[in-house]
Image (cartoon, rainbow, N blue to C red):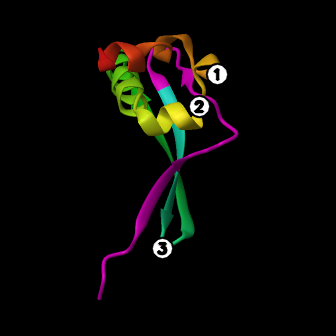
Amino acid sequence: MSAPRMQVSRVPSKPVRREEDGTLTIDLWLRRDGAFETDLALRLTSAEAEILHAQLCYALDDETAALITPESKRPDCRKGVLATRRN
């Protein structure tokens, strides 16, 4: 018997939010073998969120991302980084 295929995805209608205790919450859906299983919440401290933000910017700043999202439409934190990394 094979292990179930688990998939986690963001709830598209819910933005990231800051809780009263200062943590940031990202609402997620968990699916097992394609069927909805439950809602989850990823809670991050500000420091954890900042590290994730930096890692995502770095991971997204490659040739493929540049083709998908023109620099004029990227967030300020990602503008010009690709050019800097090439030099």
Q: Position of residue 79 (x, y in %)?
A: 50, 14
- The quadrant of the picture occupied by the N terminus is bottom left
User: Mark 1 or 3 closer to N-term?
Assistant: 3
Among all residues in the image, which is located at the extreme right? 13
Q: Which residue is mark 2?
A: 69
Q: How many marks?
A: 3
On the image, numbered disc 1 is attached to which residue?
A: 73
Instruction: Give the spatial CA distance, label 2 vs label 3.
Output: 32 Å
In the image, is residue 5 part of the stretch drawn in magenta? Answer: yes
Magenta-tinted stretch: 1-24
* 10 Å crowding of disc 1: few (<14), some (14-19), many (20+): few
Q: Residue at x 56, y 70 (%)?
A: 35
Q: Residues within 10 Å of mark 3 (few under 14, many from 20)?
A: few
Going by the numbered disc 3, the residue's amino acid type is Asp
Question: What secondary structure do most residues of the magenta stretch adopt?
Answer: loop
- Please name the amino acid that badge 1 sits on: Lys
Q: Is residue 20 above or below residue 25?
A: above
The question of residue 69 being in magenta is answered with: no
Task: Determine whether the residue tagged by mark 1 lies in a helix, strand or loop.
Answer: helix
Callouts 2 and 1 close, C-beta under 8 Å: yes
Q: Label 2, label 1: how many angstroms apart (C-alpha)?
A: 6 Å
| Dot 2 amino acid type | Thr
In front: mark 1 or mark 3? 1
Q: Residue at x 43, y 35 (%)?
A: 63
Q: Do callouts 2 and 3 mark residues in contact (Cβ within 8 Å)?
A: no
- Res 23 seen here: yes
Q: Residues within 10 Å of mark 2 (few under 14, many from 20)?
A: few
Secondary structure under the numbered disc 2 in the rendered image? loop
Which label belongs to residue 33?
A: 3
Task: State the SS at label 3.
Answer: loop
Which of the two discs, 2 and 3, labels the residue nearer the N terminus? 3
